[in-house]
Every structure is written in C-alpha cells, then in structure tokens.
Image (cartoon, helix red, strand yellow):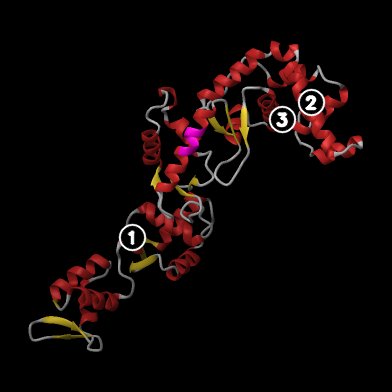
C-alpha cells in the first residue's frame, strides 16, 4: 500500500481541538477514542464508573463535546485538515471500509485512533455501521455511496452459491455497472476497495472471488483447501502435490496421508489414476475401471474393444492393458458375436 503524504500531523490536530474543552470533557473523549498514551478505548460504562456517573451521562458529555469542537474557532482554523482528508477519501473511491481507510492512514493503532477521531469530528464525513451486507464504512457523497452499495448487491445476486470468479472478471463486471461514473473512480485499486466493503462477496487466498457463504471462499478444512488447489491446477494432480500446494497457498501444514484420506472420502474428487485426483465437476466418472466401463456401455450401448479403451482413457490415467484385463472379466462383461462388449 502506498504511503500517505499529508501536510498535517493528526495527533497535533486532535490536541488543538481537544484544548477548547473542559478537563473532564477532554478526558472523556481521550478515553472514548483511545487518544491517550495507550490506544485502548474505554466503554461508556467504564468511563461512567471512573466519574461515578451513568453511561447515558457519559454519552451526553461525548456528544456535547463534539458539538462544542465543531462550533469552535479552532475547528474553523483546522478546515484545511478536513479538506485534505475529504480529498483523500474521494481519491480512495469515496466509499471505503473503515478498516481499509484507517490502514491506509497508518499501521499504528494510536495514529489510527487520532485519524478516526478527526473523521468523527469532521462534519462532512458520514459513517455507516456494519450490517449483514456491508462492513463499517465512511463516505462523503451519499449518492455515490448508495450507487456503490447497489452495484455490490447486483454483483452478489449474479453469483451462484459456489461460483468462483477471477478478480479481473469481477472488476470488469463492476466497471460495466458503473460506466457512467466519474473517470477518476475507474481503476482496479478503487474497485477492489469497493468490493472489500461487502460482507457477502469475498476473496479466497488464491485471489478468486465469490459468495462469502461458500466454502470455496471461506475454506475451513483440508477438503476445501484441496478442492481449491485442484481447481486452480486445472487438471488431474497427484495427492502428494495437493498436500504440497495446500502448505504453499494456505500456510497450513498438510500431511500427505491425511490429504489422501480426505480426497478419498469427499465425493467432489474422483481418482483417475494411481494417486491422481480430478474434480467430479469436470465430468469424470467415479468408480474403479470396471465401473467406468459399465457406465460407458450403459450410456453408449455395446461397443467394440477399441472404442471402450478410447473412452476409458478419457476418464482414467491407466495402461491400456488394465482396461483389457477388466473387460475380460466374465462376471461383468460378455463379448457378443458382433465383436461388441455388453454388460451383464
């Protein structure tokens, strides 16, 4: 993330703004917003106990103090600070999740608290609380905010439950929905910030986007990790390589034996060769070679030996002789006078 170059120091600005308040009012805001030597923020109850007053009285002091600051000459003199903050917020996309915005300012918790306080005091800054759809977020343009939220809703509605979309494709879809917006917003970094506001759309560790309710996005176990690894690989892969890739991509220690065991038990995977696994959604038939032969004959009718071998090799990475040995088993197949093989 690029470094933010601002013309002011947030701690100096908050110190000036707080100076117009009484000692107790200052103390309430310092504790409430974590503006002291320690960045911890106290609850209304904790501050109330300190002064032997109710939490509601603390809230009144907090609100009255913020109003007093906004009405003060010091606040008016600090107008360039708030203009600069507004310009930065617009540069970042006009609607930014609180976490992203504060991380953009600084990685230091104490410094973040001072920026947060300035956003709270600034009259033009609007904050919406976290809900089922979106995270805590800040904006200055209500119309733009609603447009972005509605676009996020549309993108979510277009995604099927377990669908995964490449980041570039999702960004293109987003930009198509907002093509009439100001050109300054039409870049990947801004769109990624907008996407990160959503609670319902998320990105997995492989950089693919989908619904956060899907295990393809919020992978929770070895089977989910294996699914994403094999899907990314795009073709059958040995279970040892799956275990290795899980460790690489997800920073999780994947034991080879455990990984193999999970692949065997999960119906999403099909063993297509010695130690080789593919995804069933790719169209591979489940079962051992004889099962595959039976299903091919059920589907396509009796076939000559060469055709059966050809079709099985599309389903399994095995030697031709393995197929022929299975085909000769009289418990399952018979060869007709026409030279074709039938199921028993």
Left or right for 25, reference 206: right
Q: CA distance from mark 1 to mark 3?
A: 50 Å
Mark seen at residue 296: none
Residue closest to the far bottom? 331
The residue located at (57%, 47%) in the rendering is: 132
Give the image location of residue 287, x and y in percent: 33, 74
- Residue under circle 3? 110
Does any portion of residue 132 appear in the rendered image?
A: yes
Q: How many marks?
A: 3
Q: CA distance from mark 2 to mark 3?
A: 24 Å
Left or right for 255, reference 162: right
Q: Tell me which secondary structure the magenta stretch mostly adopts.
A: helix
* Mark 2 and mark 3 residues within 8 Å of each other at the beta carbon: no
Up the image or down, 38 lies above or below 283; here it is: above
- Residue under circle 1? 236
Give the structural element (helix, strand or loop) at label 3.
helix
Give the image location of residue 200, x and y in percent: 51, 47
Dot placed on the residue nearer the N-terminal end, 1 or 2: 2
Neighbours of disc 2 within 10 Å: few (<14), some (14-19), many (20+): few
Q: Give whichever of 247, 40 is nearer the camera.
A: 40
Q: Magenta stretch?
A: 146-150
Dot placed on the residue nearer the N-terminal end, 2 or 3: 2
Whether 289 is among the magenta residues is no
Neighbours of disc 1 within 10 Å: few (<14), some (14-19), many (20+): many
Left or right for 103, reference 293: right
Up the image or down, 251 lies above or below 292; here it is: above
Whether 147 is among the magenta residues is yes
Q: Quadrant of the C terminus?
A: bottom left
């Amino acid at each position: 993330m690029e470094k933010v170059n601002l013309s002011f120091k947030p701690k100096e600005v908050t110190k000036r703004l707080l100076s117009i308040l009484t000692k107790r009012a200052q103390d309430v805001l310092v504790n409430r917003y974590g503006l002291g030597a320690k960045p911890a923020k106290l609850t209304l109850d904790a501050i109330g106990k300190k002064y032997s007053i109710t939490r509601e009285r603390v809230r009144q002091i907090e609100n009255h103090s913020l109003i007093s600051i906004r009405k003060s000459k010091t606040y008016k003199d600090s107008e360039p600070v708030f203009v600069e903050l507004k310009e930065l917020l617009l540069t970042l996309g006009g609607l930014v999740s609180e976490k992203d915005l504060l991380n953009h300012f600084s990685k230091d918790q104490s410094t973040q608290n001072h920026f947060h306080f300035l956003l709270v005091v600034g009259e033009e800054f609007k904050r919406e609380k976290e809900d089922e759809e979106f995270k805590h977020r800040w904006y200055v343009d209500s119309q733009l905010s609603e447009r972005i939220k509605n676009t996020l809703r549309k993108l979510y509605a277009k995604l099927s439950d377990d669908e995964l979309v490449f980041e570039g494709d999702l960004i293109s879809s987003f930009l198509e929905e907002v093509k009439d917006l100001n050109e300054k917003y039409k870049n990947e970094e801004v769109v990624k910030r907008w996407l990160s506001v959503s609670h319902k759309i998320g990105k997995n560790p492989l950089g693919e986007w989908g619904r956060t309710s899907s295990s393809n996005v919020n992978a929770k176990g070895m089977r989910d990790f294996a699914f994403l690894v094999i899907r990314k690989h795009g073709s059958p892969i040995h279970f040892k390589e799956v275990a290795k890739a899980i460790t690489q991509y997800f920073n999780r220690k994947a034991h080879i034996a455990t990984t193999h065991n999970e692949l065997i038990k999960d119906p999403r995977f099909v063993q297509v060769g010695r130690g080789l696994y593919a995804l069933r959604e790719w169209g591979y038939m489940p079962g051992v070679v004889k099962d595959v032969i039976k299903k091919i004959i059920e589907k396509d009718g009796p076939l000559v030996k060469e055709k059966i071998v050809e079709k099985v090799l599309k389903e399994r990475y095995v030697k031709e002789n393995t197929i022929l040995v299975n085909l000769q088993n009289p418990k399952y197949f018979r060869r007709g006078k026409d030279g074709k093989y039938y199921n028993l």
